[in-house]
Amino acid sequence: MLMQFMLLFSRQGKLRLQKWYVPLSDKEKKKITRELVQTVLARKPKMCSFLEWRDLKIVYKRYASLYFCCAIEDQDNELITLEIIHRYVELLDKYFGSVCELDIIFNFEKAYFILDEFLLGGEAQETSKKNVLKAIEQADLLQEVN
Amino acid sequence: MALKIVKGSIDRMFDKNLQDLVRGIRNHKEDEAKYISTCIDEIKQELKQDNIAVKANAVCKLTYLQMLGYDVSWAAFNIVEVMSSSKFTYKRIGYLAASQCFHEGTDVIMLTTNQIRKDLSSPNQYDTGVALTGLSCFVTPDLARDLANDIMTLMSHTKPYIRKKAVLIMYKVFLKYPESLRPAFPRLKEKLEDPDPGVQSAAVNVICELARRNPKNYLSLAPLFFKLMTSSTNNWVLIKIIKLFGALTPLEPRLGKKLIEPLTNLIHSTSAMSLLYECVNTVIAVLISLSSGMPNHSASIQLCVQKLRILIEDSDQNLKYLGLLAMSKILKTHPKSVQSHKDLILQCLDDKDESIRLRALDLLYGMVSKKNLMEIVKKLMLHVDKAEGTTYRDELQHTCNTKLCNCSTLILLRYISILVELTRLEGTRHGHLIASQMLDVAIRVKAIRAFAVAQMAMLLDNAHLLTGNMQRNGICEVLYAAAWICGEFSEHLEDPNQTLEAMLRPKVATLPGHIQAVYVQNAAKLFATVLRKHEGATDSQAAQETSQLLVERLPLFVQSANLEVQERASCILQLVKYIQKLQQKDVEVAEEVSALFAGELNPVAPKAQKKVPVPEGLDLDAWINEPPSESESEDEKPKAVFAKEETKHSRPRHTEVDEKELARRREARKQEQANNPFYIKSSPSSQKVYQDAPGVEHIPVVQIDLSVPLKVPGMPMSDQYLKLEEERRQKEKAEKKKKEKKKKREKHGKGKKHDSGPESEEDITPAHHVDIVTEEMPENALPSDDDDKDPNDPHKVYDIQGNLQDGSQVVVSVIFENKSDSFLKSMEFNVLDSLNSKLQRPEGAGPHDGLVVPFQLPPGVSNEARFIFSVQSIVMPQKLKGTLTFIVKSEDSSTHEKLDFKLHFTCTSYLITTPCYSDAYAKLLESGDLKSSSLRLEGVNMPFHHLLARICFHHHFSVVERIDSCASMYSRSIQGHHVCLLVKTADQTVSIDAKCDEPSLLGNVLDEIKQTFSQC
């Protein structure tokens, strides 16, 4: 379940969020992003959510105009990765209140904060939605107080 | 001061915040780059200010720009400044920026150590939280080393929120600073039983990841995890634990047996697909690793297959895909279970999703058997026609070409037609492969030649249909095969004239040179056939017309730029012109022209060359020319493997150069054979046809099941075959049923279930017998490779010849010599078996019975008998006690006598002289799997080459290479252990460094070598 990276991009191929859990150079990251965005966008809507890419497995899912795309290792479980993606979308949805692409564009740092409370180092750290949202709310509160 | 602050906040009001930046970028779609560069300038200004709020805002914007692909590494120091802010609002932004922008090469990371340590110990758990989160992204080995202790302390923090983060990040710390694992592990293990489920799950995660990298260190935790698995209800944790067990079972098979039950329970009970999938995968992996010794595993496999079937039948593409993926894993070990779901998998070929179709195809690869082949091929052919997507199509054709078509001789005919059909597909890239397969089949299987020739003629005739873009795709290679087959077996052609005409069309000149060359040559063969055909008839006109045709068309090829084509064409043109003249004089020429191409081409057995006995007086190892000069061989010298020896310039030994030379020649010969289509290669694919008869000796006539009509008119269509085939089989089945019914009445047993349709499991009875052309063997070939035997004094020394048989059988040749004056008879050979070595006795014989020696010995005569021993472990030498009983017959009386002896199985006797090339040898040594040992021999007073010869002779080694007074040697045990020696000599001292994958075997071999040299 150790995720290598997660990318969020729009139907137009614009990157909306990126989180790398493996150390890579900027150049390499850009190359991977470009390649994957192209590959995933080229897939037809009825196709399954998995593809083999280099020695990794890519798991992606489209929510409205956004693609959520994760890379996992060979022995990892594709279905649980889909669940992680879905859980993250639910979290965003709860936090922003029916989330849309613009929420993530304009509050991209919040989207990162939520992700960081949910996953750490590529592992799911909290499986309870409630706990994640509670942590975010309290941290936000701290921010307001300041 | 106060004024400055006020001024600062007024400034801020005019600053762009992140939202403004995003909006601005969206509004400047046309000149985004320009807009952003002005923004970056502004940000640079903002970063120069003292106000931390302004800086944080700037850093936040930079983080956004970084995502868009702009370089922000120049602002690394400013990011550190924002991270160090005492206010959580800014600290959070700073850490986010750092986690997005920093990597191991960022040098300011060094400056952050103390700040991070401060944040980790902050009383505010959220400060600690962001520091941990950030650290998980940019931790470097230095940071890991410096902060490992702090993080370890946090693992016992009072707040579970911190504990779980600390536990998770420990994994990253271990990766960067492995030394921290040992001190941290006890605490990590403790966390497996943490009261907070989040912390517990984090600990499971980390240990699972660790165990995946190095399972054997975590075997001891298995009971704890077993408990967790049966008690936990959290699917995420369960998946992790199951995965962990998957990694552990290969090391501990007992664990696997224990696992099957809880796993099958989970498979039955869970509703979560992810968990189900994980369980199924692990069960498969466990069963594969157990493979033997599981009495009851077919039920588990059945369960897995059933569940997978449900996944595949699901409308969700994802489940379908994963189901097929897992199915292919089962296929490797339990093909039967998968084959029964063929229908389902064939259905998947119709799926909308290409990746699912590819998976299904992958599965079909492995599923094909004699029985279902027709159906699968048929289905595939349908698919090739409508296939979309290039990868899929390519894959599909590849499947048809290689896998399906290789699997049985049953379908040779089908094969030809499939090949022909394949050529009609656009865009195939496998032209070459198809061509070589066509040649292979046509040459080897006489019965199908007529059919093949007819198909090929059709192909040649329709070559223009194939063209289009065929040059680029290599499909024209097929014409190479077609032309050759039509020429060589032209007697089968119905209308050679037409084919000849087709081969000489001007369009042919656009084909690649090597194909044109074949066209020209085979046109001549066809010409000969045409002449012969018309000779008998009175109609000399037709023959003359044919000559005329050649004379007209050939000049086109004479002008070819390709030398081969040109040469052949001009040669044949002159020949035809000459024939033409003779024809005009009404001379019969057909016989003579045919003689040009007389003689049948037969395939040559791969071992044929080896079987030719070396003629007397020919020494293959002797130099024909002067050996190459010193300097040349110096260059060729491969690198020494064990250690570098100072090279003293001396003339290299002939033997060594011979070895190299031989290797080179061998390589060249292999190359040549590979390029020669008429040479049956030793590649597995072409040998598959002979699966049933592995030895060449048994090949001569092979009966193959060929239940397909031999001649089918018209263009080949798969349907026709399939129909005929099915009809025939159904008829057979009907007959069988009748017979069976009769039986039933007699026995009145329960009715047997009968499958219907072509999927029946019954064997297909052959409709035709086809003889495959005998492979050519040289006359006076030896029946089998004889081993050299050196006879030794009997009754004292038994020479043991280790022969590789199943890796654990040793053949012992015993030479009996009668040194007495009496006649010896009724000899019985018996050995007291040990646990390890047993004499193989005929079935029914007791374990202590002796074996009758199958001969009698008159005085002064010696004879050899062979006995087979099965040996389990070969790493230790063995002595077996034995007795020979016999009857001594003198003139007036006969006495019963016995002779005790000992059979000494040295470790050496398990070694087989095996040649090894220096590169393979080097690879072997570099692999690091071998244990080393060494030996020193003092006072050895013999030339180095004698020494080597002695090791080779007595201990079955071969010299890999020799450089001056240093040589590397190799041998292999009958169980496949590699034994490598490096022998060096200096001043009567010989040192032997040795490596072997089995240390005790090596030790014993070295002892034996020592023994050998102590005797001299």
Image (cartoon, coloured by chain):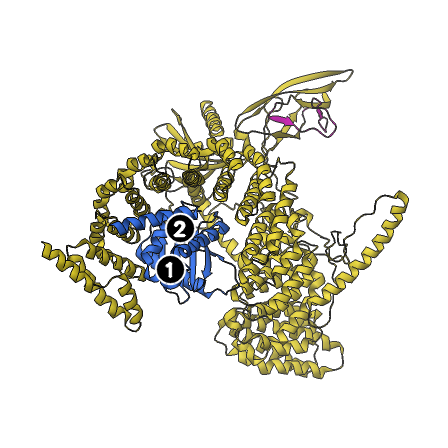
Chain colours: A blue, B yellow
Residue type, numbered disc 1: Thr
Residue B251, numbered label? none
Residue B632 shown left or right of residue B298 in the figure: left
Q: Are the residues flagged by discs 1 and 2 in contact, CB closer than 8 Å?
A: no
Q: Is residue B131 above or below residue B465?
A: above
Residue B617 shown left or right of residue B773 in the figure: left
- Residue that badge 2 annotates: A4
Residue B71 shown left or right of residue B953 in the figure: left
Q: Is residue B839 magenta?
A: yes
- Residue that badge 1 annotates: A33
Q: Position of residue B969 (x, y in %)?
A: 45, 37
Report helix, strand or loop for mark 1. Answer: helix
> For the point 63% across and 68% down, which residue is it?
B420
Residue found at the very far front of the displayed protein: A145
Task: Using the image as rendered, state which of residue B342 and residue B22 is in the foreground.
Answer: B22
Q: Is residue B107 above or below residue B343?
A: above
Task: Using the image as rendered, state which of residue B842 and residue B21 is in the foreground.
Answer: B21
Q: Which residues are magenta?
A: B834-861
> For the point 58% across and 36% down, which residue is it?
B788
Q: Quadrant of residue B146?
A: top left
Which secondary structure dominates the residues rendered in magenta? Answer: loop
Q: Position of residue B304 (x, y in %)?
A: 61, 46
Host chain of mark 2: A
Host chain of mark 1: A
Residue A57 shown left or right of residue B112 in the figure: right
Q: Position of residue B928 (x, y in %)?
A: 42, 38
Residue type, numbered disc 2: Gln
Q: Quadrant of residue B961?
A: top left
Between discs 1 and 2, the one toward the N terminus: 2
Dots 1 and 2 on the same chain: yes
